[in-house]
């Protein structure tokens, strides 16, 4: 039996933070119903990869779910939502509070229908009155936190091209949902779980922010070179790029021996991580010279022997073909209607030894399970046909 077997989740999520939270709950056994617009949610068709236009990220974020379509603005649609909420344990909806209220998905409305309901509602900026209805995406959370300023160069700030803040917020929301379910066993009552992209971004950048608050160092961007330890940078071998990260005395000592400069370990300029970070450009220069005449395979093998964290810089294609990635057995290749090949769906990041998560079903087609879901709440076939004719489903 899976951990969340028997838990029913309604997923009104959009884009990443909400849908991936719901996918994580589904991986652990929850029955997740994705509720979409009749024409399909806007996040379904971003970066299309199938004949019908389903997006690349959509296929990852909506595995293990069932899909129903519903016009939430219609009276009949609202009544169906009410019937679904009565039977549900968790509602996931990452929208501004004003939007939640207009759709009847705010916690005050939901708890009048089902006092045991748990609402997981992430937003861009949180629930403070001054910012609660502002909209934002992952890049906004990155930018406001200070992390974009510290990436790239002083002339050109740079955000991460993968949505790190969105995904981290999803993990926080999934944790919050499980905590609220655990607490409900004692109290018998649901509650609202809140999270924001801004709070997640600030937590991820907290080391730099605390340092600035206390020491006023005014760090500047140094591209790929770390500021608080060294050498930590991206380097070029004869046939490709790789990254290393040297942190701590023992590792730095091994690195000096590897590059044939053992005297650097006794050099006062490199006495600790902070000082090495200040002289990071010099140490990166030494590392760059060391790897100039080496192949990528040779450099990485020597770094592995010296027990220094290192990895090649993979393109997306190389990541899929990487021997380490393959050996880790983290990809489930799945069929999807209209896809030109099998879809790589990536494993749940957290495993449990006795009750592991699993990815058993591909992402659903738009409204693929509408009839079955409505039948579950007592809607007969004639009524389903009438709702479809009316455009409610």
Image (tube, grey):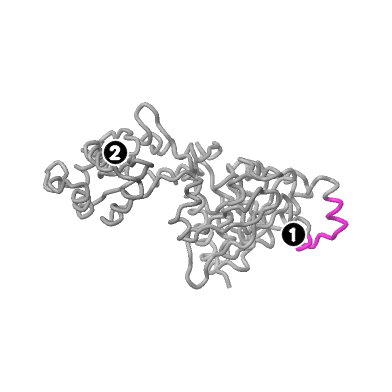
Q: Main secondary structure of the magenta part?
A: helix
The x, y position of residue 39, in whole percent, is: 74, 43
- Residue under pointer 1: 373
Identify the residue at image location x=30%, y=44%. Answer: 294
Q: 211 left or right of 112?
A: left
Q: Is residue 382 magenta?
A: yes
Q: Nearer the viewer, residue 307 or 144?
A: 307
Q: Which residues are magenta?
A: 373-387
Where residue 101 sits: x, y (%)?
Answer: 64, 45
First of labels 2, 1 by sequence position = 2
Q: In the image, what residue occupies the spot 74% across and 51% down? A: 367
> Dot 2 surroundings within 10 Å: few (below 14), some, or many (20 or more)?
few
Give the residue at x 28% y 52%. 302
Residue to which mark 2 is pinned: 212
Judged from the image, the secondary structure of the residue bearing numbered disc 1 is: helix
Q: Position of residue 3 (x, y in %)?
A: 55, 68
User: Label 2 to label 1, Cα distance in Å?
Assistant: 53 Å
Q: Is residue 15 left or right of residue 312?
A: right
| Element type where label 2 sits in the image | helix
């Amino acid at each position: 039996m899976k951990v969340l077997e028997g838990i029913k989740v309604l997923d009104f999520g959009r884009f990443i933070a909400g849908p991936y939270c719901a996918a994580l709950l589904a991986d652990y056994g929850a029955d997740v119903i994705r509720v979409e617009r009749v024409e399909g949610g806007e996040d379904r068709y971003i970066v299309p990869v199938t004949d019908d236009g389903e997006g690349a990220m959509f296929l990852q974020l909506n595995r293990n779910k069932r899909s129903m379509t519903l016009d939430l603005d219609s009276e009949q649609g609202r009544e169906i939502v009410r019937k679904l909420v009565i039977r549900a344990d968790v509602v996931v909806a990452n929208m501004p509070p004003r939007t939640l209220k207009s759709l009847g998905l705010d916690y005050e409305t939901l708890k009048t229908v089902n006092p045991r309901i748990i609402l997981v509602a992430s937003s861009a900026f949180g629930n403070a009155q001054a910012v609660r209805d502002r909209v934002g995406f992952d890049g906004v959370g990155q930018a406001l936190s200070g992390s974009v300023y510290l990436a790239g160069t002083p002339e050109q700030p740079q955000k991460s091209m993968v949505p790190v803040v969105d995904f981290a917020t999803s993990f926080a929301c999934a944790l919050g949902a499980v905590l609220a379910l655990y607490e409900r066993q004692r109290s018998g009552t649901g509650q609202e779980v809140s999270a924001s992209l801004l709070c997640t971004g600030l937590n991820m950048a907290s080391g730099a922010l605390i340092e600035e608050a206390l020491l006023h160092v005014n760090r500047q961007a140094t591209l790929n070179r770390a500021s608080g330890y060294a050498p930590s940078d991206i380097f070029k071998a004869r046939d490709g790029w790789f990254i290393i990260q040297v942190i701590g005395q023992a590792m730095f000592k091994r690195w000096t021996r590897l590059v044939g400069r053992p005297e650097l370990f006794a050099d006062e300029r490199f006495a600790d991580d902070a000082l090495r970070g200040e002289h990071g450009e010099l140490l990166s220069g030494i590392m760059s010279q060391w790897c100039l005449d080496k192949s990528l395979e040779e450099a990485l093998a020597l770094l592995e022997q010296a027990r220094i964290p290192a990895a090649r810089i993979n393109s997306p294609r190389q990541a899929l073909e990487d021997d380490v990635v393959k050996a880790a057995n983290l990809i489930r290749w799945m069929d999807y209607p209209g896809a030109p090949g099998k879809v790589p769906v990536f494993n749940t990041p957290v495993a449990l030894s006795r009750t592991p998560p699993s990815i058993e079903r591909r992402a659903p087609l738009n409204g693929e399970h509408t009839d079955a879901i409505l039948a579950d709440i007592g809607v007969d076939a004639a009524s389903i046909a009438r709702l479809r004719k009316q455009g409610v489903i």
